[in-house]
Image (cartoon, grey):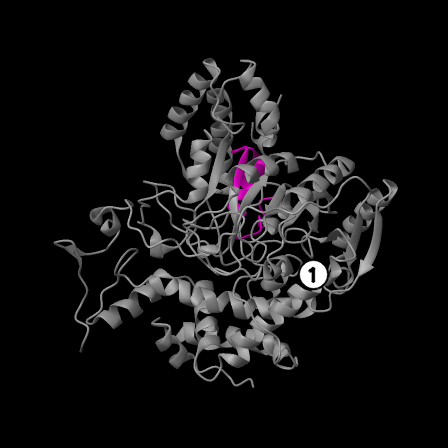
Amino acid sequence: MKKDIDIKSVAKLAAINLSEDEEKKLEKDLNIILEHVEALSKMNIDDEEISIHPLGETLNLREDISSEFLTHDEAMSNSPETEDGHFVVPPSLD
Amino acid sequence: MNLSNSSISEINKLYKNKELKPSEVYEEVFNNAALSESIIHAHLKLFQEEGIAASKLSDARFAKGKQLSQLDGIPIAIKDNINLKNHETTCSSKMLSNYISPYDATVISKLRNSGVVFTGKTNLDEFAMGSSTENSAFGPTKNPWNPQHVPGGSSGGSAAVVSVGSALASLGSDTGGSIRQPASFCGVVGFKPTYGTVSRYGLVAFASSLDQIGPITNSVEDAKIIFNSIKGHDPLDSTSIADTSIEIPDDKTAKVGVIKELMEDGISDESKNEVEKTIKLLEDQGNKVVEVSLPLTKVALSIYYLIAPAECSANLSRFDGVRYGSREFGETSYQMMENTRAQGFGEEVKKRILLGTYALSAGYYDAYYGQALKARSLITKDFENIFKDVDYLISPTTPTPAFKFGEKTENPLEMYMSDLCTIPANLAGLPAISIPTGLSSENMPLSVQLMSPARTDSSLLKFSEKLENLISFDQRTSLLKEMK
């Protein structure tokens, strides 16, 4: 299963701009970790069921009822840039 | 009397008898912080003015005989990945260095309503990813027993403040051992409750199926008092479980299993020796101790290092420079995001995001993440089967006592191995506690870990209290004495 990681494409997927030094160091570390977790792929556990909640519980969602929580201003208070109650971002297309 | 080492119940009694005031205790812990911070750097922020004001309000309540709870006027520190309204929540990351929380986490609301005095926010490995606080963007915390050694992590600041007496207790979060491992390294008690018993609402998520908030304290009794105050179903956390606890009968002696695989290679003789000494104490009291085997502990680390990074890569995608956190320049939105995340995250966080992104990417999902989830189910079943035969499990908390700075930073696996004994409880969602037992040849604290079936937290705490009395570890760091 294991193939050496293509660090550039994974960094692109993760939206992290890595320097060349970082690419080298992280690629080395990630390959060490992937080598270690390889032991799992040899386990014959295809029929095993999976559960996202560790105790096998179903996730309980709240009733869909609106209530007082944060004001609009509070919710946006940590944004790096806002205008008239909206988030401001650079253009989305080149 | 050294107030900062006293138990919460003792202090509460003194408050009620009007022999002591909350503001006096707050003053003592603040002075301890002022003295020790230049050496150990355990707090990222101290709330001096707010602490004085809150402790005086508590003074007034006790003067009128109207205490809010046993925790009224008790100074408690909070790990800086838990939101406290109108204060920074930095997660020890440059990404959130300016973030001010507009709301309280559920655990904070509960403690606030109990009259707790918040002392400040404590240091951690960035976004709780690490085992030494060496990954904090604001510099590491030092171990109060010996500042050349790490305090453990990720809740290293929370463990160090209790150890040195600059808070009576603290809250940490535990994803793979982040409460128990630093508690062990600093010679204090650390308790990770059953997954879902304490709300995660307001805890900055790292790996949502593993994260759990819990107390770090001077004693098991203190851990019990805090746990009882913060537990309970919370509609704001969809993974929170109903308030149903299961009791392990305590009218007879207990049967304790010692996990064979956590007493083998990779565990130091000193750590094993503490378990053996504790087994002897348990047997002397008539408890039965048997060896049990959990072969999958050998792959627990692999399971964890696929599931935790996968969940972290999803959780940390929210840090995009738009809604909160730092922002770097970019010509387009995507370039802005890439640059923001490049500058905002430290190396370990980047490593885990990349690992998780890879494990979840097309073509690898089933082989890595899917396979890890299946193996996790198996390990959970193994625990269930073992608990049909034994009441509790015992192991070392950590493979070694606290290591020195820089000792495990070269190879990521060496650092990850320090969570070898604590990770299985997170995978299976079990309650687990670290109890200090003795000192190493280098005078660093050592501990044992007890685990029990899911939802038996109260029984585990009761049994741990008995064991703590048998061990009677009463050593404290002499750091403050040396400084005074």
- Residue B341 x %, y %: 34, 65
Which portion, as a residue range, is magenta? B146-170
Where residue B462 sits, quadrant-wise, is: top right
- Residue B37 x %, y %: 48, 38
Where residue A51 sits, quadrant-wise, is: bottom right
Residue drawn at (54%, 18%), measured in percent from left and top? B15
- Residue B355 x %, y %: 48, 72
Residue B84 visible in image: yes
- Residue B137 x %, y %: 42, 54
For residue B88, side relative to residue B4 (left or right): left
Q: Quadrant of the C terminus of chain B?
A: top right
Residue drawn at (47%, 29%), measured in percent from left and top? B30
Residue B120 visible in image: no
Residue drawn at (41%, 52%), measured in percent from left and top? B91
Going by the numbered disc 1, the residue's amino acid type is Glu
Residue B167 falls within the magenta-colored stretch: yes
Asked which secondary structure carries label 1, the reply is helix
Residue B191 falls within the magenta-colored stretch: no
For residue B427, side relative to residue B76 (left or right): right
Tell me the residue that label 1 is attached to: B384
For residue B288, side relative to residue B152 (left or right): right
